[in-house]
Image (spheres, rainbow, N blue to C red):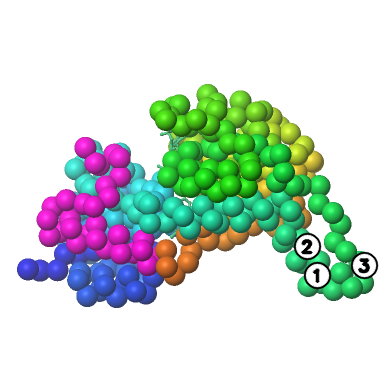
């Protein structure tokens, strides 16, 4: 049997590319001098896309590929893929849920503690020699003690974060599109209500048009001057300019961000702020977890081309 042709828009881990090169005819778009012309020349052949959150698989790209059968995403968040359009065209879309949940939840708790207890700033203080020259680092205004954590997006990762936060003694609240059966944490119908009931907001909802800038100036104000915002979900969910203003003006206390509106760019204004802890989208970025995500993506492609079904289809294409 001929090896199916797979388009790879953006670089993937070497170990995954090795298997893709072995089992498929691969087309690595980022290596092409003229990606548009190359795409035109191979469009008829492409049966699958091995995608990742930094690649955009929009309706325009999908419609250029008449024989496309599957888009397999390296990541659980698939806001970069027009999954509704794929579903309309009968194209399968898969993602990598569960295998990264615990890793991302660990990172979220790390960010929370770093932001509340100023761990990055205090480490910078030591490295600058100030402990010796100026004495102990000032006591932090922030503490985890008595904090109420509002989780925006109580899904797989949100629940893993909640389990950890409970162990730290935090009171948990949540908001999503609906109240969940069997969940005892207080539910809030909208984000402003959630923020007003809490002082710490954990954003772990998906990106995309429905959640764009859901965390705005009003939500930040409702969180209050002791407020801490952590974003481990998607940069687009927070209005970044409103967040910068709130951090600068003491509307909230601090923020911890793993994701940004225009990755890999983190705004200079955020970088200049000592009350913002900034990570370069490393939530799932251990070799262990990225290998597991890669295996699941490869399983989805293999099962599709061998058996005609996928292991982890996204909601839009699972019916
Ligand atoms: P999940 O299990 O599908 O959970 C998503 C949660 O968000 C659900 O509880 C859902 O609840 C809620 N939600 C979905 N759409 C919403 C909307 N329009 N408005 C309000 N709430 C909404 O997904 P997951 O596995 O936990 O992953 C969550 C997200 O984390 C991913 O989509 C991805 O963007 C991000 N992520 C980031 C990293 C990183 O490295 N930083 C790594 C992995 C994932 P309802 O259905 O009740 O609304
Ligand atoms: C990505 C993520 O997989 O799963 C997601 O939604 O955001 C990360 O785990 C990572 O950016 C790989 O490119």
Magenta portion: prevailing SS class: helix
State the image coordinates of residue 187 (x, y, percent, origin top left). Answer: 52, 27
Q: Quadrant of the C terminus?
A: top left
Q: Secondary structure at mark 2?
A: helix
| Ligand 2 in which quarter | bottom left
Name the element at disc 1. helix
Q: In the image, is 140 to the left or to the right of 280?
A: right
Kindly identify which residue carries mark 1.
126
Q: Tell me which segment is drawn in magenta.
A: 290-319
Circle 1 packing at 10 Å, graded few (<14), some (14-19), many (20+), is some
- Could you tell me which secondary element the residue under label 3 belongs to? helix
In the image, residue 246 above or below residue 134? above
| Label 1 beta carbon within 8 A of ligand 1 | no
| Quadrant of residue 279 within the rendered picture | bottom right
Residue at mark 3: 134
Evaluate whether residue 148 shows in this view: yes
Can you name the residue that lies furthest to the left here? 1
Q: Residue at x 48, y 43 (%)?
A: 159
Q: Is residue 190 above or below residue 80?
A: above
Q: In the rendered image, which residue does mark 2 sit on?
A: 122
Asked if the residue at tag 1 contacts the one at tag 3, i.e. Cβ–Cβ closer than 8 Å, the answer is: no
């Amino acid at each position: 049997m001929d090896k199916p042709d797979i388009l790879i828009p953006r670089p993937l881990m070497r170990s995954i590319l090795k298997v893709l090169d072995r089992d498929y005819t691969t087309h690595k778009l980022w290596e092409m001098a003229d990606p548009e012309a190359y795409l035109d020349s191979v469009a008829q052949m492409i049966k699958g896309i091995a995608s990742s959150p930094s690649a955009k698989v929009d309706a325009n790209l999908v419609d250029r590929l008449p024989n496309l059968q599957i888009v397999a995403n390296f990541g659980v968040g698939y806001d970069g893929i027009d999954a509704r359009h794929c579903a309309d065209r009968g194209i399968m879309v898969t993602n990598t849920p569960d295998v990264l949940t615990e890793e991302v939840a660990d990172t979220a708790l790390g960010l929370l503690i770093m932001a509340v207890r100023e761990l990055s700033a205090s480490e910078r203080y030591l490295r600058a020699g100030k402990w010796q020259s100026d004495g102990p680092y000032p006591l932090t205004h922030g503490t985890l003690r008595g904090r109420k954590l509002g989780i925006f997006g109580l899904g797989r990762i949100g629940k893993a974060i909640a389990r950890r936060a409970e162990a730290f003694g935090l009171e948990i609240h949540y908001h999503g599109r609906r109240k969940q059966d069997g969940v005892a944490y207080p539910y809030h119908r909208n984000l402003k209500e959630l923020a007003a009931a809490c002082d710490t907001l954990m954003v772990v909802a998906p990106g995309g048009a429905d959640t764009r800038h859901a965390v705005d100036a009003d939500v930040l104000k409702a969180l209050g001057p002791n407020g801490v915002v952590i974003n481990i979900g998607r940069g687009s969910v927070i209005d970044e300019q409103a967040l910068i203003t709130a951090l600068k003006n003491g509307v909230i206390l601090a923020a911890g961000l793993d994701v940004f509106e225009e990755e890999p760019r983190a705004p200079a204004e955020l970088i200049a702020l000592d009350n913002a802890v900034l990570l370069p989208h490393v939530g799932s970025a251990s070799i262990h977890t990225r290998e597991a995500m890669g295996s699941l993506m490869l399983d989805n492609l293999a099962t599709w081309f061998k058996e005609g079904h996928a292991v982890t289809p996204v909601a839009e294409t699972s019916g």
